[in-house]
Image (cartoon, rainbow, N blue to C red):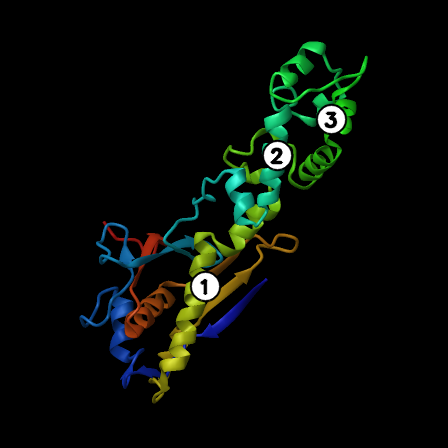
Protein backbone atom coordinates (compact mmCIF):
# COMPACT_ATOMS: atom_id res chain seq x y z
CA UNK A 1 0.00 0.00 0.00
CA UNK A 2 1.34 3.44 -0.87
CA UNK A 3 0.07 6.87 0.05
CA UNK A 4 1.18 10.51 0.00
CA UNK A 5 2.18 11.55 3.50
CA UNK A 6 1.72 15.15 2.37
CA UNK A 7 2.81 17.26 -0.54
CA UNK A 8 5.79 19.49 -0.23
CA UNK A 9 4.20 22.74 0.84
CA UNK A 10 5.01 25.04 -2.04
CA UNK A 11 4.14 28.33 -0.36
CA UNK A 12 5.98 27.89 2.94
CA UNK A 13 8.38 30.28 4.63
CA UNK A 14 10.62 29.55 7.56
CA UNK A 15 11.89 32.47 9.58
CA UNK A 16 10.40 34.80 7.00
CA UNK A 17 12.32 33.21 4.11
CA UNK A 18 10.51 31.41 1.29
CA UNK A 19 11.82 27.88 0.90
CA UNK A 20 10.96 27.19 -2.73
CA UNK A 21 11.57 30.16 -4.98
CA UNK A 22 12.16 30.71 -8.68
CA UNK A 23 15.94 30.89 -8.26
CA UNK A 24 15.90 27.74 -6.15
CA UNK A 25 14.04 25.92 -8.94
CA UNK A 26 16.55 27.26 -11.44
CA UNK A 27 19.39 25.87 -9.34
CA UNK A 28 17.68 22.50 -9.18
CA UNK A 29 17.14 22.39 -12.95
CA UNK A 30 20.79 23.34 -13.55
CA UNK A 31 21.99 20.87 -10.90
CA UNK A 32 24.11 23.73 -9.54
CA UNK A 33 23.49 25.78 -6.37
CA UNK A 34 22.71 29.37 -7.34
CA UNK A 35 23.41 30.53 -3.78
CA UNK A 36 25.41 29.12 -0.90
CA UNK A 37 22.11 28.66 0.94
CA UNK A 38 20.94 26.16 -1.67
CA UNK A 39 22.58 22.82 -0.96
CA UNK A 40 21.61 20.19 -3.49
CA UNK A 41 21.84 16.40 -3.13
CA UNK A 42 25.41 15.16 -3.05
CA UNK A 43 26.97 12.49 -5.23
CA UNK A 44 28.79 9.55 -3.66
CA UNK A 45 32.23 11.07 -4.24
CA UNK A 46 31.39 14.34 -2.52
CA UNK A 47 32.19 15.13 1.09
CA UNK A 48 29.43 14.90 3.67
CA UNK A 49 29.78 17.37 6.55
CA UNK A 50 31.01 15.90 9.83
CA UNK A 51 28.25 14.82 12.18
CA UNK A 52 25.62 14.58 9.46
CA UNK A 53 23.19 11.75 9.03
CA UNK A 54 23.18 10.41 5.48
CA UNK A 55 19.95 9.86 3.56
CA UNK A 56 20.96 7.60 0.71
CA UNK A 57 18.72 7.81 -2.36
CA UNK A 58 18.54 4.74 -4.61
CA UNK A 59 16.80 4.93 -7.97
CA UNK A 60 14.22 2.29 -8.77
CA UNK A 61 12.64 2.39 -12.22
CA UNK A 62 8.91 2.81 -12.02
CA UNK A 63 9.01 3.80 -8.34
CA UNK A 64 11.44 6.65 -7.81
CA UNK A 65 14.16 7.25 -5.26
CA UNK A 66 13.87 4.95 -2.24
CA UNK A 67 15.41 6.56 0.85
CA UNK A 68 17.72 4.88 3.39
CA UNK A 69 18.89 6.59 6.58
CA UNK A 70 22.53 5.81 7.40
CA UNK A 71 22.35 2.60 5.42
CA UNK A 72 21.78 1.00 2.06
CA UNK A 73 19.36 -1.46 0.44
CA UNK A 74 21.92 -4.15 1.17
CA UNK A 75 21.93 -3.69 4.93
CA UNK A 76 21.07 -6.72 7.03
CA UNK A 77 19.76 -7.13 10.57
CA UNK A 78 22.47 -6.80 13.22
CA UNK A 79 24.38 -9.80 14.50
CA UNK A 80 22.83 -10.69 17.84
CA UNK A 81 22.73 -13.95 19.73
CA UNK A 82 19.47 -15.71 20.43
CA UNK A 83 20.08 -15.16 24.16
CA UNK A 84 20.56 -11.41 23.63
CA UNK A 85 17.44 -11.16 21.51
CA UNK A 86 15.33 -13.07 24.02
CA UNK A 87 16.54 -10.78 26.81
CA UNK A 88 15.76 -7.77 24.60
CA UNK A 89 12.24 -9.16 24.18
CA UNK A 90 11.82 -9.59 27.95
CA UNK A 91 12.13 -13.39 27.79
CA UNK A 92 14.92 -13.84 30.34
CA UNK A 93 13.04 -16.76 31.91
CA UNK A 94 13.55 -18.77 28.70
CA UNK A 95 17.30 -18.35 29.03
CA UNK A 96 17.19 -19.33 32.71
CA UNK A 97 15.20 -22.47 31.89
CA UNK A 98 17.56 -23.56 29.12
CA UNK A 99 20.62 -22.81 31.25
CA UNK A 100 19.31 -24.98 34.09
CA UNK A 101 18.44 -27.83 31.73
CA UNK A 102 21.85 -27.64 30.03
CA UNK A 103 23.65 -27.60 33.39
CA UNK A 104 21.93 -30.81 34.43
CA UNK A 105 21.47 -32.73 31.19
CA UNK A 106 23.35 -30.89 28.47
CA UNK A 107 26.08 -33.53 28.24
CA UNK A 108 23.46 -36.14 27.30
CA UNK A 109 20.56 -34.28 25.67
CA UNK A 110 21.37 -31.81 22.88
CA UNK A 111 18.00 -32.16 21.16
CA UNK A 112 14.60 -33.16 22.47
CA UNK A 113 14.74 -36.19 20.16
CA UNK A 114 17.39 -37.53 22.57
CA UNK A 115 14.66 -37.85 25.20
CA UNK A 116 13.41 -40.97 23.44
CA UNK A 117 16.78 -42.71 23.80
CA UNK A 118 17.46 -45.25 26.54
CA UNK A 119 19.40 -44.16 29.63
CA UNK A 120 22.73 -45.93 30.02
CA UNK A 121 24.11 -46.82 33.42
CA UNK A 122 27.37 -44.96 32.72
CA UNK A 123 25.38 -41.82 31.94
CA UNK A 124 23.59 -41.94 35.27
CA UNK A 125 26.96 -42.54 36.92
CA UNK A 126 28.19 -39.34 35.31
CA UNK A 127 25.12 -37.52 36.59
CA UNK A 128 25.73 -38.83 40.10
CA UNK A 129 29.30 -37.59 39.95
CA UNK A 130 27.87 -34.14 39.39
CA UNK A 131 26.88 -34.01 43.05
CA UNK A 132 23.32 -35.37 43.06
CA UNK A 133 22.34 -39.00 43.56
CA UNK A 134 20.11 -40.42 40.82
CA UNK A 135 18.53 -43.81 40.24
CA UNK A 136 17.22 -45.29 37.03
CA UNK A 137 14.87 -48.05 35.99
CA UNK A 138 15.70 -50.85 33.50
CA UNK A 139 15.00 -49.81 29.89
CA UNK A 140 14.09 -46.33 31.04
CA UNK A 141 14.19 -43.54 28.44
CA UNK A 142 15.62 -40.11 29.12
CA UNK A 143 12.10 -38.73 28.99
CA UNK A 144 11.00 -41.14 31.73
CA UNK A 145 14.10 -40.35 33.75
CA UNK A 146 13.81 -36.56 33.51
CA UNK A 147 10.06 -36.63 34.13
CA UNK A 148 10.68 -38.49 37.39
CA UNK A 149 13.37 -36.10 38.56
CA UNK A 150 12.49 -32.77 36.88
CA UNK A 151 8.95 -32.91 35.60
CA UNK A 152 8.40 -29.14 35.71
CA UNK A 153 11.78 -28.36 34.15
CA UNK A 154 11.11 -30.74 31.28
CA UNK A 155 7.69 -29.20 30.73
CA UNK A 156 9.22 -25.70 30.70
CA UNK A 157 11.93 -26.72 28.23
CA UNK A 158 9.44 -28.28 25.85
CA UNK A 159 7.32 -25.13 26.00
CA UNK A 160 10.40 -23.04 25.20
CA UNK A 161 11.19 -25.20 22.19
CA UNK A 162 7.58 -25.06 21.01
CA UNK A 163 7.64 -21.25 21.23
CA UNK A 164 11.15 -20.52 19.93
CA UNK A 165 12.25 -23.58 17.95
CA UNK A 166 14.81 -26.28 18.67
CA UNK A 167 17.63 -23.77 18.19
CA UNK A 168 16.84 -22.34 21.61
CA UNK A 169 18.14 -25.57 23.18
CA UNK A 170 21.22 -26.02 21.01
CA UNK A 171 22.26 -22.54 19.88
CA UNK A 172 21.21 -20.10 22.59
CA UNK A 173 24.56 -18.28 22.38
CA UNK A 174 24.91 -18.41 18.60
CA UNK A 175 23.95 -15.56 16.29
CA UNK A 176 20.33 -15.60 15.18
CA UNK A 177 19.47 -17.06 11.83
CA UNK A 178 16.93 -14.34 11.08
CA UNK A 179 15.24 -16.43 8.41
CA UNK A 180 14.18 -18.87 11.14
CA UNK A 181 12.48 -16.09 13.10
CA UNK A 182 10.11 -14.49 10.58
CA UNK A 183 8.29 -12.35 13.12
CA UNK A 184 11.51 -10.79 14.40
CA UNK A 185 12.76 -10.26 10.84
CA UNK A 186 9.51 -8.55 9.81
CA UNK A 187 9.66 -6.32 12.89
CA UNK A 188 13.24 -5.30 12.09
CA UNK A 189 12.37 -4.56 8.45
CA UNK A 190 9.37 -2.44 9.43
CA UNK A 191 10.86 -0.51 12.35
CA UNK A 192 14.67 -0.66 12.41
CA UNK A 193 15.92 -1.07 8.85
CA UNK A 194 17.56 1.90 7.04
CA UNK A 195 14.45 2.44 4.91
CA UNK A 196 12.13 2.38 7.92
CA UNK A 197 14.45 4.82 9.71
CA UNK A 198 14.34 7.13 6.69
CA UNK A 199 10.55 7.05 6.71
CA UNK A 200 10.46 8.02 10.38
CA UNK A 201 12.99 10.79 9.73
CA UNK A 202 10.97 12.29 6.88
CA UNK A 203 7.76 12.10 8.93
CA UNK A 204 9.44 14.00 11.75
CA UNK A 205 10.84 16.52 9.30
CA UNK A 206 7.43 17.36 7.86
CA UNK A 207 5.90 17.57 11.32
CA UNK A 208 8.57 20.12 12.28
CA UNK A 209 8.06 22.06 9.04
CA UNK A 210 4.32 22.33 9.60
CA UNK A 211 4.84 23.34 13.23
CA UNK A 212 7.41 26.07 12.45
CA UNK A 213 6.53 27.22 8.92
CA UNK A 214 4.20 29.94 7.80
CA UNK A 215 2.28 30.45 4.58
CA UNK A 216 3.79 32.77 1.98
CA UNK A 217 2.78 34.16 -1.36
CA UNK A 218 2.28 31.57 -4.08
CA UNK A 219 5.07 30.85 -6.54
CA UNK A 220 4.77 31.93 -10.15
CA UNK A 221 2.35 29.82 -12.14
CA UNK A 222 3.87 26.65 -13.52
CA UNK A 223 6.72 26.45 -11.04
CA UNK A 224 4.72 24.98 -8.18
CA UNK A 225 3.63 22.09 -10.38
CA UNK A 226 7.22 20.83 -10.34
CA UNK A 227 6.92 19.95 -6.67
CA UNK A 228 4.99 16.77 -6.14
CA UNK A 229 4.96 14.60 -3.02
CA UNK A 230 7.04 12.22 -0.97
CA UNK A 231 5.25 8.89 -1.23
CA UNK A 232 5.10 6.54 1.73
CA UNK A 233 4.92 2.80 1.17
CA UNK A 234 3.56 0.50 3.85
CA UNK A 235 3.83 -3.07 2.61
CA UNK A 236 5.55 -4.20 -0.57
CA UNK A 237 2.39 -5.95 -1.81
CA UNK A 238 -0.72 -7.64 -0.40
CA UNK A 239 0.41 -10.27 2.07
CA UNK A 240 3.89 -8.78 2.50
CA UNK A 241 4.18 -6.16 5.24
CA UNK A 242 7.97 -6.11 5.51
CA UNK A 243 8.63 -2.92 3.54
CA UNK A 244 8.01 0.52 5.02
CA UNK A 245 9.80 3.32 3.23
CA UNK A 246 9.66 6.84 1.82
CA UNK A 247 10.01 7.43 -1.92
CA UNK A 248 10.94 10.66 -3.69
CA UNK A 249 9.64 10.47 -7.27
CA UNK A 250 12.48 12.48 -8.80
CA UNK A 251 15.52 14.68 -8.27
CA UNK A 252 13.44 17.79 -7.58
CA UNK A 253 11.85 16.11 -4.57
CA UNK A 254 15.28 15.10 -3.26
CA UNK A 255 16.46 18.69 -3.61
CA UNK A 256 13.34 19.92 -1.82
CA UNK A 257 14.00 17.41 0.95
CA UNK A 258 17.53 18.78 1.34
CA UNK A 259 16.16 22.34 1.34
CA UNK A 260 13.78 21.60 4.19
CA UNK A 261 16.48 19.77 6.19
CA UNK A 262 18.81 22.76 5.93
CA UNK A 263 16.10 25.34 6.59
CA UNK A 264 15.13 23.57 9.80
CA UNK A 265 18.76 23.32 10.87
CA UNK A 266 18.76 19.53 10.93
CA UNK A 267 22.09 17.86 10.22
CA UNK A 268 21.60 15.48 7.32
CA UNK A 269 22.77 15.19 3.72
CA UNK A 270 20.87 13.58 0.87
CA UNK A 271 23.25 11.48 -1.23
CA UNK A 272 22.58 10.07 -4.69
CA UNK A 273 23.88 6.62 -3.85
CA UNK A 274 22.46 5.05 -7.01
CA UNK A 275 21.12 7.85 -9.23
CA UNK A 276 18.90 7.56 -12.25
CA UNK A 277 20.80 7.77 -15.56
CA UNK A 278 19.55 11.33 -15.98
CA UNK A 279 20.82 12.42 -12.55
CA UNK A 280 24.19 10.65 -12.64
CA UNK A 281 27.39 12.68 -12.93
CA UNK A 282 28.18 13.14 -16.60
CA UNK A 283 31.70 12.08 -17.61
Q: Earlier in the sequence, mark 1 or mark 2?
A: 2
Residue 23 in sight here:
yes
Q: Nearer the viewer, residue 47 or 197?
A: 197
What x and y, as percent, mark residue 241?
Answer: 60, 54
The quadrant of the image that shows the N terminus is: bottom right
Residue topped by disc 1:
200
- Image position of 271 with respect to 155: above or below: below
Q: Nearer the viewer, residue 70 or 259?
A: 70
| Crowd rating for badge 3 (residues with CA inside 10 Å; few <14, some 14–19, many 20+) | some
Mark 2, mark 3: which one is toward the viewer? Answer: 3
Question: Which comes before the other along the chain, label 1 or label 3?
Answer: 3
Mark 1 vs mark 3, CA separation in Å: 50 Å
**Disc 3 designates what residue?**
146
Q: Hey, which quadrant is residue 69 in on the image?
A: bottom left
Mark 2 and mark 3: span between their CA atoms?
Answer: 14 Å
User: Mark 2 = which residue?
Assistant: 98
Residue 99 percent across, percent down from the top left: 58, 33
- In the image, taking residue 111 as reference, residue 23 lies left or right, namely left
> Which residue occupies the extreme bottom position in the image?
217
- Of residues 143 and 253, the one nearer the viewer is 143
Cα gap from disc 1 to disc 2, whole angstroms: 37 Å
Give the secondary structure at mark 1. helix
Position of residue 52 measured from the top left corner of the image (x, y, whole percent): 28, 59
Query: Is 111 situated left or right of 17 in this image?
Result: right
Amino acid sequence: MSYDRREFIKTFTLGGIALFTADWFAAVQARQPAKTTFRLPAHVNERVPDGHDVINAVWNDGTGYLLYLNGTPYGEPPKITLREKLIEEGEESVCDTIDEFQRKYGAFISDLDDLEGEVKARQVKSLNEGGEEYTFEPDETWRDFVERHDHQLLSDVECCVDDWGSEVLRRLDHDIDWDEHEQWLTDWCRHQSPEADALAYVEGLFDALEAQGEEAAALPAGIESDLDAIVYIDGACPGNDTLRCAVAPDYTQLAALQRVIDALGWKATVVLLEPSPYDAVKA
